[in-house]
Amino acid sequence: MSSFRLAMSPIMSLPPSSPSVAAPSPPSSIDLPVRPVPGSYGWPLVGPFTDRLDFYWFQKPEAFFRKRMDKHKSTVFRTNVPPSFPFFTNVNPNVVALLDCKSFAHLFDVDLIDKKNVLVGDFMPSIAFTGNMRVGVYQDTTEPQHPKVKKFIFDILKRSSGVWATELTSNLDVMWKNIETTLSESSSASYIFPLQRCLFAFLCKVLAGADPSRDPEIAKSGYAMIDRWLAVQLLPTVPLGILQPLEEIFMHSFRYPFFLVSGDYNKLYEFIKKEGKEVIERGETEFGLSQDEAINNLLFVLGFNSFGGFSLFLPSLIEAVASDETGLQEKLRAEAREKGGSTLRLDSVKDMHLIQSVVYETLRLNPPVALQYGRARKDFRLCSHESAFEIKKGELLCGYQKLAMRDPVVFEDPESFRPDRFTEGGVQLLDYLYWSNGPQSGSPSEYNKQCAGKDVVTLTASLVLAHMFRRYDSIKGNASSISALQKAK
């Protein structure tokens, strides 16, 4: 998931094509005491292995970082982040962890940070998963193909603005009808697969101009194909919470080969090639991409960034609202029905400040991608709130967003979910909301690595909430299922 402003079209416009829109430089280290980066990587092989067990097994990621932050009395320290020895001998797990807003901001300074092949740190799935090419997400801003791919994605988002809301709401209607049917026969209804079917059909239409209903197999199983494609790439790096040591042995022991999902990917490729022909041709004629580059980059944005990101984030958003017992739903319902006009559009939610704040607060506490990486492009001085640190060229920096965005220096009562945190006087806090590989107040450009659809994502999530509270008076559930729905009177 990876800014569009309400200007050139009724919904969004392209950001200025100028290097000046890159993420702002991190704060100066003047007047801060300079200290060595605390922590160590331990003995060769042994240190990475014990850190790996803590990360996946004994502590889990959040406790892993918190314990080391407490031990070193610093939000910046050296540690190892898996995958690592003994099964990944060609992956270096050594990182400098960044756990506060001030140090985290360095990750978005393109003058300091190289983003080549660091989507998941030093680990990179085989390029066979992306058509035997490095798609845009793996490219640094200095590479010649990066601006071409980024402009292509900007163009897709701009052109889709006219149908974005109508396609979203029509597919949400289908999803909610299916959930209602299941609830009429059971005490709860899982919404994960209905949500994914909704997302897949919607994203194919708006991003690729491709209608899944034209291909029966894709219509039925396209979302599951993407699930499998994502899982095989990321399983070696993701804590699952299943029974140990089985998870450690069978999930984190090796890279999974592409042939396990090659059939799925080839079917998705051919579907996009045939049904998304107009979009692909624009990629070739207007942005200088080959057909393969256009299709594989579009598939990555559709499947990894958009489908994968929304599949992780929207359940967190629904749970935050559906499990609330403080009266939040009544306020959201009133705002959704009183503002935005009779028909929901992308810009309908621009005056729904509480709904947008709930989206931002959920992103703050549960970002869809927890870890951000970058490699030092040169020697430089990095600073936290309290100290400055000398970073050497080539060192890998790792920001853990779940702690960086709970920085008590920036956020009052940072561990609590405060629905109105980003309303009125809290708007300036968007400078520190970093879920999109940059601040929410920043602007994506071909010159930086911020998510091209940053604003579209938050507007879409706001539309999901607005649509839900125009359809229902109340909702009860959690991050996987709905237990009660009260239809709007």
Image (cartoon, rainbow, N blue to C red):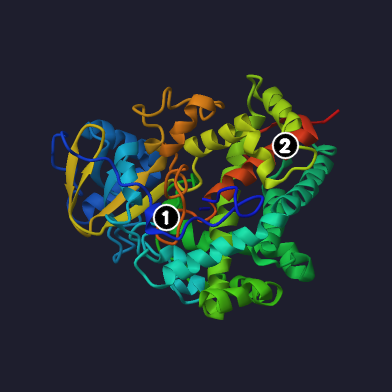
Q: Which amino acid lies under the numbered mark 2 shown in the image of this protein? A: Gly
Residue behind mark 1: 237
> Earlier along the polypeptide chain: callout 1 or callout 2?
1
Is 112 on the left-hand or right-hand side of 419? left
Task: Say which element carries label 2.
Answer: loop
Quarter of the image for residue 252 reads bottom left
**Above or below for 83 versus 62:** below
Quadrant of the image for the C terminus?
top right
Residue behind mark 2: 340
**Above or below for 273 versus 174:** below
Q: Alpha-carbon neighbours of circle 2 within 10 Å: few (<14), some, or many (≥20)? A: some
Q: Which amino acid lies under the numbered mark 1 shown in the image of this protein? A: Thr
Circle 1 or circle 2, nearest the eye: 2
Residue 440 rendering spot, x and y as whole percentages: 47, 43
Is 130 on the left-hand or right-hand side of 488? left
Residue 449 rendering spot, x and y as whole percentages: 42, 57
